């Protein structure tokens, strides 16, 4: 249940952000990473961290 709540909060945070591409990418990547980790039974915290870093890199390149 906690994993699902964390994933939902991360997705909501990503949707509501209106900052630069780097922050948006990090938030969306973190939410995606947490969601994938929750579904596959892995560590949600590690998934969010890896996804956030990847999203920040993509957001920086796009910006």
Image (spheres, helix red, strand yellow):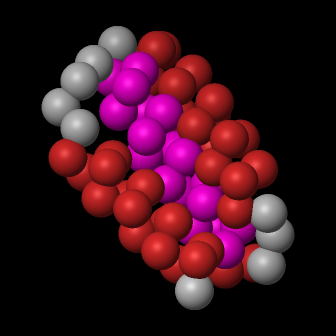
Image mark count: 0
* Horizontal arrangement in the rendering, residue 56 relative to residue 44 (left or right): left
Residue visible at 64% across and 67% down in the picture? 36
The part of the image, by quadrant, that contains residue 34 is bottom right
Direction front: furthest residue: 2
Q: What segment is highlighted magenta in the picture?
A: 21-38
Is 30 within the magenta? yes
Relative to 4, residue 56 above or below: above
- 3 horizontally vs 63: left or right: right
23 sits to left or right of 39: left
- The picture places residue 28, in percent across and down from the top left corner, at 43, 46
Q: Position of residue 14 (x, y in %)?
A: 33, 47
Where's residue 7, x and y in %? 50, 66
Q: Quadrant of the image for the C terminus?
A: top left
Q: Is residue 59 magenta?
A: no
Residue 40: image quadrant is bottom right
Q: Residue at x 52, y 44 (%)?
A: 29
In the depicted structure, whether residue 22 falls above or below residue 11: above
Instruction: Kindly tell me whether residue 58 is visible in this rendering.
Output: no
What residue is rendered at 53% in x and 57% in y? 32
Q: Is residue 43 above or below residue 26?
A: below
In the image, farthest residue toward the right: 42
Q: Which of the two residues, 12 or 33, is positioned nearer the viewer here?
A: 12
User: Which is the main secondary structure of the residues drawn in magenta?
Assistant: helix
Residue found at x 58% / y 37%: 52
């Amino acid at each position: 249940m906690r994993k699902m709540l964390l994933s939902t909060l991360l997705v909501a945070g990503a949707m509501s952000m209106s900052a630069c591409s780097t922050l948006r990418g990090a938030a969306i990547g973190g939410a995606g990473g947490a969601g994938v980790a929750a579904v596959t039974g892995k560590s949600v915290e590690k998934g969010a961290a890896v996804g956030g870093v990847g999203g920040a890199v993509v957001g920086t390149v796009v910006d």
